[in-house]
Amino acid sequence: METGEQAALRALQQAVDAGTTPGGVLACGRGGDVELLEAVGWAHTGEDQRPMTRDTVFDLASLTKVVGTLPVVLALVAGGELGLDTPVAEVLPAFAQESPERSRVVIEHLLTHTAGLPSHREYWRLGLASDELRERLVTEPLEAPPGTRVCYSDLGFLALGWIVEAVTGRSLDALVADRVTAPLGLGRTGYGPRPPAEVAATEARPGGGYKVGTVHDETAAALGVPVGHAGLFAPAADLATYMGAWASGDGDWLSGELRAAAVRDRTAGMDGHRGLGWTARHDRFDQLGEAWPESGVFHSGFTGTSLALDPVSGRWVVLLTNDVHYGRQRGHINPLRQAVHTALAP
């Protein structure tokens, strides 16, 4: 009989064979134990064809939110340097923009995507200097009163990155290193650029070639500094360690109370289901599939990456692909994610 691990790898291999996904690395485990770490397909296609390996580094895209920014924010909360109820404008005065509604936005609103901010803005197309681009993003008008709707927002996590820098006086990449990668021993996780030979290629560049080792997200690239919504790179083995830390509760890296608060659905009365950073069951971005329990949480990245966790059973799944290498809006990555998660359900 086929095991869940075998079925999940078969689903990934079928996607590669069908030409819908270039390649990927799949890892899963329970608690602190890694049960599977395998690579399939290609890290780069075409003239620069290069096979995917278990050591391939990926542009994590929006996984940056839960791998970098979220644990830094929670560490500052644990240390009393920041509160979930701290008004954003108290730390970033420009955020208030003399608006009573904006002055009511607090840190938890940003973490749960309930601040009323839009999903994203393509100001990078305007060719603005980094400082002017940041000013536009920080002062972007709300689309809804805070705490009334769920809208997954890059702008909210950009603000969180700037908030932790303002509170500590340190850069976000240094904070991620001190609060996340060093304590957990994630030796190959960090912001780019990264050596192209070790990184899975993402999207084709308009002028030819591919983005390899440089951040795929256009806003992060235009800002030119480490930011809170995208930009981290990591291999699957590092993320397996990271997810094991969330699932096992070993050590003092992050308190059990904060981890439990982060994975609890905190927006059930609204039009979405969000924990702190994490996507909870039945949110429109939930791609865990029907077999996962109500306690499961998820997050994805636009380049083709995703993380899944059930804090009750300790089951976790890391699926890293370079799906965007074949172009945007192809529609294949979500069914692949659900097939993998169904095979590996707790």
Image (cartoon, rainbow, N blue to C red):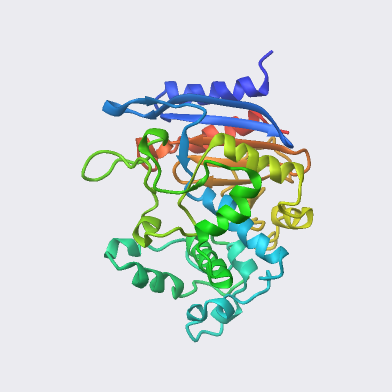
Compared across the picture, whether 107 is left or right of 40 comes to right
Q: In this view, does 175 lie above or below 162?
A: above
Instruction: Tell me if residue 272 can be seen.
Output: no
For the N terminus, the quadrant is top right
Q: Position of residue 211 (x, y in %)?
A: 33, 42
Q: Residue furthest top?
A: 1
Compared across the picture, whether 52 is left or right of 180 comes to left
Nearer to me, 156 or 195: 195
Q: How many marks on residues? A: 0
Q: Is residue 184 above or below residue 226?
A: above
Compared across the picture, whether 177 is left or right of 241 comes to left
Q: Which quarter of the picture shows residue 270?
A: bottom right
Q: Is residue 315 above or below residue 127?
A: above
Q: Which residue lies furthest to the left in this view?
A: 207
> Which residue is located at x 54 percent, y 79 percent?
102
For the C terminus, the quadrant is top right
Nearer to me, 154 or 57: 57
Q: Where is residue 50 in the image (x, y as percent from the top left)?
A: 37, 26
Nearer to me, 37 or 285: 37
Q: Where is residue 181 in the image (x, y as percent from the top left)?
A: 59, 48
Q: Position of residue 106 (x, y in %)?
A: 62, 73
Instruction: Tell me if residue 92 can be seen.
Output: yes
Q: Which quarter of the picture shows residue 35?
A: top right
